[in-house]
Image (cartoon, rainbow, N blue to C red):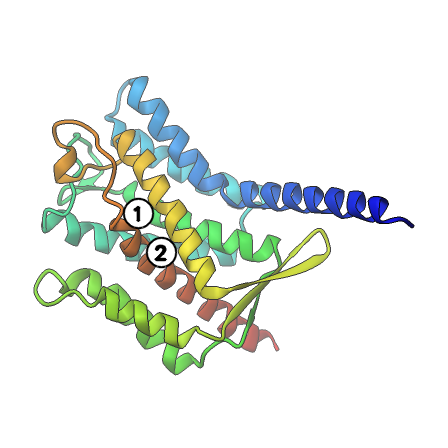
Amino acid sequence: MNTSTLVKRSYKSSIKQLLVFGWEQALSCLFPVVIFASLAITQYIPLPLLPRYDWLLLICLFMQWLMVRSGLETKDELKVITLFHIIGLALELFKVHMGSWSYPEEGFSKIFGVPLYSGFMYASVASFLCQAWRRLKVELVKWPPFLAVVPLAAAIYLNFFIHHYWIDLRWWLSGLVIITFWKSWVTYEVDGIRHKMPLSLSFVLIGFFIWVAENIATFFGAWQYPNQAEAWSLVHFGKVSSWLLLVIVSFLIVATLKQVKGKITE
C-alpha cells in the first residue's frame, strides 16, 4: 500500500471521527438547544395566555419529561439534573438579590425576582455532561482523591456567594484546580477509537463555549446584566473565568457521583 493511499485513508478516518464526535455532541446538547430555541422564539413571537417566563418553564418541564420518557435521558441522570436545578436556583436567587443581573419581565412563576425556568439553564449543563459522559464512554485517568475534590468543589461554589462580602478567591481557586488536576486526563471513545485530553483543557473549552452561549442567551433576553439595561452588549470576556469555575464545579459533582455509583455497583 503506497503512501498516498495511507494518507487518504487517514484523512477519511479523521473526517469520520469528527462527524461522529459532532453528532454525539449534538445529541448531548439537545436540552440546551431547546432552551435557546425557546428563548429565540418567545422573544420574537409572543405566546398567548401566559407571560413569556411561564411559557419557558412549561417548555423546559415538557422537554425534561420527553427526554426521560423517550429514553434520551436516564432516571439516574434526571436525579443529577434535579440536583443542579436546585444548586443553580439557589445561586440565581442570591445573585439577583445582589444585583449581579436581573429578570425584568413579568411572570407568575417568579420567586423573589427569579423565574423558575432559570434553574433549567444550569440543569442543561448537567444534562450535557451526563449525556456526553455516557455517549462517549468517558473515563477518568489519575483522578484526585475524594477528600481533595469535594472540598475544592464546595469552595468554588461558595466563592460565588462570599466574594460579595469578602475577597474574590477565584484566581487562587483556579490555581488550586491546576495543581489538583495537573496529572488528570479524560479519555473518550469516538466510533470505537479512544482519545484523551488533559482535564484542565476540557474545563477551559467547555467554559468558553458556555460564555458564547451566555451571549446568545442574553441577546434573546434570558436575563439581563446591568450594562445591558439600555441595549444588548457583549458579555465581558472576564465572565469566562466565572463559567470556567462553574463548569469545574459541575464536572466535579458529576464525576464524584459517577465514582460513588461505580463503587456501589461493584
Amino acid type indicated by mark 2: Phe
Residue at 57% across, 45% down: 72
Amino acid type indicated by mark 1: Gly
Residue 84's disc number: 2
Whole-angstrom CA distance, mark 1 to mark 2, is 8 Å
Q: Position of residue 133 (x, y in %)?
A: 55, 57
Q: Looking at the image, tell me whether mark 1 or mark 2 is earlier in sequence order.
A: 2
Q: Position of residue 123 (x, y in %)?
A: 38, 50
Q: Residue furthest left?
A: 165
Q: Determine crowd level at label 2: few under 14, some 14-19, many 20+ residues with C-alpha closer than 10 A.
A: many
Residue at 36% across, 40% down: 213
Q: Position of residue 41 (x, y in %)?
A: 36, 23
Question: At numbered mark 1, what does the secondary structure look like: helix, strand or loop?
Answer: helix
Cβ–Cβ below 8 Å for labels 1 and 2? Answer: yes
Residue at 35% across, 63% down: 249
Horizontally, residue 213 falls left or right of residue 201, namely left
Horizontally, residue 222 falls left or right of residue 145, namely left
Q: Position of residue 17 (x, y in %)?
A: 68, 47
Question: Is residue 242 placed above or below 226 in the rendered structure?
Answer: below
The quadrant in which residue 146 appears is bottom left
Q: Please state which of residues 85 and 65 is positioned toward the viewer in this rendering.
A: 85
**How many badges with numbers are in the image?**
2
The quadrant in which residue 227 appears is top left
Q: Disc 1 marks which residue?
A: 119
Horizontally, residue 69 falls left or right of residue 225, namely right
Q: Determine crowd level at label 1: few under 14, some 14-19, many 20+ residues with C-alpha closer than 10 A.
A: many
